[in-house]
Image: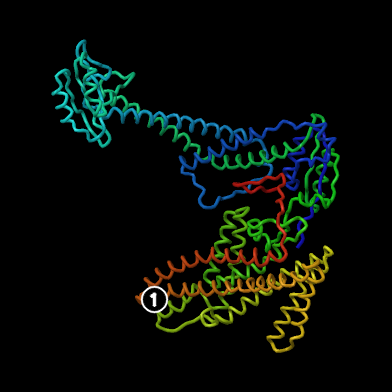
Amino acid sequence: MAIVKMKKLRVIAMAGRREELLEGLLRLGCVEISEPDGKEQEWSALMRRGQSRLLSAKEDITQAGTALAALKKYAQSKDGLFIQRRPVSEAEFLGGKTVEKARAVSRDIGEQLQALTRLQNEESRLLARQASLQPWRSLDMPLELEGTASVLFRMGVCPGGADTGAIKTELAAAADAAAELYELSADKQQNYYLLVCHRADESAVMELLRPHAFSVVSFQGLTGTAAENLQNLERQLEENHGAQARAAEAIAALGGEKELLQLYTDRLRAEEAREVNAERMLTDGTILFFEGWAPAERMGDVQSLLEKLGCAWEASDPTEEEIPEVPVQLKNNWLTRPLNMVTEMYSLPAYNNVDPNPLMAPFFILFYGIMMADMGYGLLMFLAGTIISRKYRPKGTMGHMMGLMQLCGVSTFIMGAITGGFFGDFLTQVVKLTTGGDFALPALFTPLNDTLMILVGAIALGGVHIVTGMAVSFIRKLKAGAVLDAIFEEATWWIVFAGIGLMAAGVTNIVLYAGLALVVVGPLVTGQGFGKIMGIFGSLYNHVTGFFGDFLSYARLMALMLAGSVIAQVFNTLGAIPNNIIIFLIISLAGNALNFALNLLGCYVHDLRLQCLEYFGKFYEDGGRPFRPLAMETKYVDITK
């Protein structure tokens, strides 16, 4: 149950070995390079940071990611819900043969995307010009023509809904204004006009039109009629669309290079990680110095690499002052590894705490099975987790999720076998509809008939959960030398619990009295002054209400088991009402699918609450910093030796 022991490294190497050293550490994947802690003043005074290619690596990653997104869009190359990882040898992954080709492909796609962006911007400009000219299509007059020596032509607009007849009447009635207004078109936003007036009367005419919000429109740089310009725009748009199609086809033609780009992207992320760690090294051009952390169990590999490269180094256990800085790595096996999903979602333990996964795994898996408790649902979970894990080999959180789904699926199937549930009473209804006979799966107990027994069992199981957490806390306090705290915080209440059980069984009351006496004595021994008296009431109130609430929380095990079973049976009953097997299958399968989806999430959330609040609250000290070694973290490929 211990967390992986870490060693603090201090390494001095020749600057010329920098790339070899980084490459070796990347291959090892077990050394986290950290910023110097400031205690090595002689190093920080003598050395400056070396140049890094981090910015270039980030730019390449962005370009490669954009290229992959373009292939997904234009080459219809989609990954689906899960990424299909392919195995790649370490030599192929780190080799340089495919890098230049992938970089060229990424650059070609980038150039085509830039061309597409330019063409799309041009298309937007042409469409805007087309929309602005469309209302003037019927005007058989060059757009650049402003009139003759004595007559003035003006194109203009008024807000939509303007009374054209009233405007014309007003112009005709004006004795000092010789003008004529022609309506060319109209839409919801504007009315479009051609104004013809005597040049000498322009000011008077414009003054008459001002109340109607008349504004002059001009098309600078355009010649010929609106229809001629629209025809030219249509030709340009056709050419533009053709150029866009050719650029898209050029990208689609590179769809076969998707795997190459994926490998290239993962390779770039490894280079980025290497450059991030390189920035933490100090160098003056002759030698370099860095500090870091490595698992004690991997120090043999680290030693071989450092000695091979002629490095001067030392490794030491972290001091008490360094404990908060030590990164945390949890020990994992097939059973506990999936629980990383839960621990990382909550918070990693402090370095000097215990690994919670082995302590949590049996309870989490069992509780989930109790709440779901259906053979059909358990079978679906196990098959889904197994198929996805084997076909796609997901890593990280998704990989943990699939592993946890398999384990919880087994637990759910077993509890379903105990309670006789297979998609509720699905088989019972099927037999009844097809043969008219009665059928029921064998069961030790059922949620509907043995609800009280299940409730008592759930609370009793919760008691085991809580006492286990207290036992971990008791041992940790003893190891830390806090013997009195261990006695009065944990042992005292164990005696109280045992006393309540013995009293309920009618055996004796003495054990309970002894426990209560210790509850009173505890604050008197550990408290000071008036706090001793107040500590008694505080201890009683906090512990009694706290334990009462904690124990009742485990009633959710029964509640979710009952709810899932009832909902499944309700859908099965509804489907059986028409007395038709086809209708039954449709309604039952749809209802069970909904019930399964809701319970899949609901059971996880409630199980998570029991672990994080009722269990972790008894012994867990969080705040650990995750161990992030320089390693080849990949998204698209699996690296093999």
Residue 150 occupies which quadrant of the picture?
top left
Q: Amino acid at mark 1?
A: Ala
Q: Position of residue 428 (x, y in %)?
A: 46, 79
Q: Residue at x 69, y 37 (%)?
A: 275
Q: Position of residue 267 (x, y in %)?
A: 64, 40
Judging depth in this view, the residue of 509 and 133 nearest the camera is: 509
Please, is residue 503 above or below residue 459 in the view?
below
Judging depth in this view, the residue of 143 and 637 nearest the camera is: 143
Residue 335 occupies which quadrant of the picture?
bottom right
Q: Position of residue 378 (x, y in %)?
A: 55, 69
Picture quarter with the N terminus: bottom right
Display colour scheme: rainbow
Name, please, the residue furthest toward the front. Answer: 530
Per the image, label 1 sits on a secondary structure element best described as: helix
Please, is residue 336 above or below residue 137 in the view?
below
Q: Which residue is mark 1?
A: 576
Left or right? Give the position of 464 relative to 206. Answer: right
Q: Residue at x 43, y 66 (%)?
A: 590
Could you classify mark 1 by the number of other residues whose Cα lies within 10 Å: few (under 14), some (14-19), or many (20 or more)? many
Name, please, the residue furthest toward the top. Answer: 149
Q: Position of residue 44 (x, y in %)?
A: 81, 35
Left or right? Give the position of 288 relative to 131. Answer: right
Q: Residue at x 74, y 50 (%)?
A: 327
Please, is residue 297 above or below residue 49 in the view?
below
Left or right? Give the position of 161 relative to 35. Answer: left
Q: Residue at x 72, y 50 (%)?
A: 627
